[in-house]
Amino acid sequence: MRSNAFSTSFHKLQRTRMAGLYEKPSETYAKKRPRYPKEWFSMLASLTAGHHRAWDAGCGSGQASVSIAEHYDGVVATDVSEGQLRHAIAHPKVRYLHTPEDLPEDDLVALVGGEGSLDLVIVATAIHWFDVPLFYAVVNRVLRKPGGVLAVWGYNYDIHPFGDKLHGTLYPAMRPYMDPRTRLAMERYRELPFPFEPVGVGREGEPADVDMEAEMTLEDLAGFVMTGSVATTAREKGVDLEALVKGVMKEVEEGWGDEPTVPRKLVFKAFMLAGRPRGFVKISASLSSVFAWSMEMSPFNTWSQRK
């Protein structure tokens, strides 16, 4: 059994408003997200030796939870945001659980099923919010060996065919209001430590490119931008990004092709990493330095965030 002294004190020290970032717009947020392709989950299921139990960490509204449930006997889905969980998608094989920010490591292990109990752990657009070293320690404990797989993925404002206008313009303008961990997603997880054995879906420093299609109106696209954590954080600091977003959306509208109210196909240029544990997973001193600021500067430290 691992000591919880560091885990508990760390979380108490870093009491945060992380869960609150999405509490107020939870229902709107769930409606504005693109949908993950079914093919992703079929592919991930093909990588695991068993298909008994999976864990969606940082499940948010449960989009990934219900999709992976089609391939496993049961799914435990956890999140720190009670607001998100209230709007989670119901599914007979998915059990949603609230995980408080100060939940000790041993309690979390027990909550999701215990040592060596899971065939797959997924983190959909959330791992950049986690206490990564502690999360990896838990993953190493709960995955079956051999055969268990961890898969993480994300996306940002790189949305074809408007990536230059959205990612190229919004990212620099919004950067001052980003928690440093959000920048991991903006940089496509290339700087995310991932000390796991590759299984053919990217590797540390080289995430796999995966496309995610979505039918959206111009209003939907603007809603996607304005319900993210960056816009929420900016508003809390007294900065309204609406004028900036409207300006960018005006440029997007000029290239939309049809009426703004007519949905069109957009392609989110997403990224994914998957791997198996290499014995006991540790992050080297050089890699852990990527997260050194989290104990000194960032108030954002939690087991899970949301989609």
Image: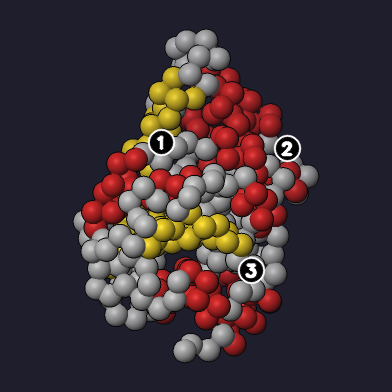
Q: How is the image coloured?
A: secondary structure
The residue carrying mark 1 is 268
Residue 292's place in the image compared with 61, above or below, is below
Q: Earlier in the sequence, mark 2 or mark 3?
A: 3
Q: Going by the image, does 158 lie left or right of 221?
A: left
Residue named by callout 3: 101
Expressed as whole percent of the image width and height from the top left, the position of residue 302 reads 59, 66
Q: How packed is label 3: few (under 14 Cα within 10 Å), some, or many (20 or more)? A: many
Quadrant in the picture for residue 82: bottom right
Q: Nearer the viewer, mark 2 or mark 3?
A: 3
Residue 240: which numbered mark, if any? Answer: 2
Please tell me which residue lies in front, 293 or 41: 41
Helix, strand or loop at label 3? It is loop
- Residue 228 occupies quadrant: top right
Residue at x 24%, y 73% (from the top left corner) = 146
**Neighbours of disc 1 within 10 Å: few (<14), some (14-19), many (20+):** many
Q: Give whichever of discs 2 and 1 has the lower sequence position.
A: 2
Per the model, the C-alpha gap separating discs 2 and 1 is 25 Å
Drawn side of residue 40 relative to residue 216, left or right: left
Say whether marks 1 and 3 touch (CB < 8 Å).
Answer: no
Q: Say whether residue 206 is visible.
A: no
Q: Position of residue 295 (x, y in %)?
A: 60, 74
Q: How many marks?
A: 3
Q: Name the outermost residue toward the right.
A: 238
Q: CA distance from mark 1 to mark 3?
A: 31 Å
Q: Residue 150 at x, y = what percent?
A: 35, 63
Q: Identify the residue shown where x is 61% and y is 62%.
A: 98
Q: Residues within 10 Å of mark 2 (few under 14, many from 20)?
A: some
Residue 173, horizontal then vertical, whole percent:
59, 40
The amino acid marked with disc number 2 is Asp
